[in-house]
Image (cartoon, rainbow, N blue to C red):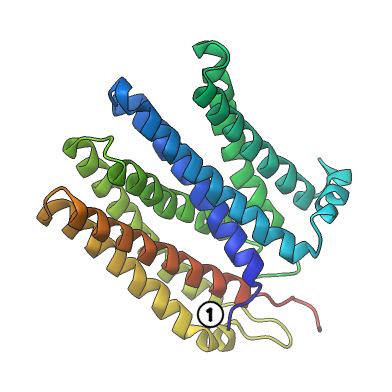
Amino acid sequence: MLYEAPLVAFTVLAQTAVGAHLTVNAFEKFGKPPRVTEPRMNIARFVILVVMGLGFLFSTTHLGSPLRAFNALNRVGSAALSNEILTGASFLSLAGLYWLLTILKIGSEGVRKIVNWLSIAVGVIFMFAMANVYQIETVPAWYSPMTTVAFWFTVVTSGLMCGYTLISVLDVTAEKTNRRLMWAGVSLIALNLAFTVMQTIHFAGISTPIHSGLDQITMLSGYVAGHVLMLVVAAALWVFAELFTAEGRQKNLLVIVAFVALFVAEILGRNVFYGMHFTSGLY
């Protein structure tokens, strides 16, 4: 059973998009891609915009109507949900504007850089705003710094792998850069595994007058196991693809499968998070 499926999809897709956006920008800054690869980088940026757009599409199904998002903006600054919607929409708009300016060669390079840096900054703020939505005192499993950490692990694992997959499949990177990204990603996945164990123990230790965290996490144990298994599979495939597979279609296929495994892992993990929703009161 999927708990709050639209929100599961929205949060994971949005975090993946922001993480991929950060990865692609870091690659352009430090990976020194040749100038001739710019059209391919624009394809990568467009894919990221599509991922973010899909996330918002799922979020509107939760709201019931896209127009309700505008109503939520009435409380920007005082309501966490309003801040999330505003920063999310701003991130998508700025990232989309930068892509459009680059494609059409509009504005100076300096102006485009400013827009891009703004999209990066707003993307980071968006991630913190999203985590803040779930800091609800009456929901003990969510009211914890672990919620923010869990959300950021999706950004730096699924997002990084999404960015890596794009630049690898589009062939705009060098083997040395690929190796560095792979080792960074696998290390973060390992940390994510350790954090998953800690968070599961944390969930199991929660109790309220009528709810038991241990009972709830036991009911969700299949999803926890699936989350862990798919993280391991993703890491193993990523290492194998990078170290033991020659450049070309076979490697790209393995990389895509590894990303899909990691994305599924985060979907399963997020389902556990929403499945742990119970209040500290008597209802």
- Where's residue 31, x and y in %? 29, 29
Residue at the front extreme of this rendering: 104
Identify the residue position indicated by label 1 in the image: 204
**Residue 198 or 9: which is nearer the viewer?**
9
x 82%, y 42%: residue: 76
**Residue 98 against residue 110 in the figure, above or below:** below
**Residue 240 against residue 4 in the figure, above or below:** above
- Where's residue 215, x and y in %? 57, 89
- Where's residue 37, x and y in %? 32, 28
**Residue 163 against residue 216 in the figure, above or below:** above
Disc 1 is placed on an element classified as helix
Position of the N terminus, as image quadrant, is: bottom right
Position of the C terminus, as image quadrant, is: bottom right
Q: Is residue 46 visible?
A: yes
x 60%, y 55%: residue: 54
Q: Is residue 175 left or right of residue 168?
A: left
x 37%, y 25%: residue: 29
- Where's residue 267, x and y in %? 50, 68
x 68%, y 86%: residue: 211
- Disc 1 marks which amino acid? Ala
**Residue 56 or 269: which is nearer the viewer?**
56
Q: Is residue 152 visible?
A: no
Q: Is residue 79 left or right of residue 222?
A: right
**Mark 1 nearby-residue class (10 Å; few <14, some 14–19, many ≥20):** some
Q: Is residue 47 left or right of residue 142?
A: left
**Residue 96 or 163: which is nearer the viewer?**
96
**Residue 69 or 46: which is nearer the viewer?**
46
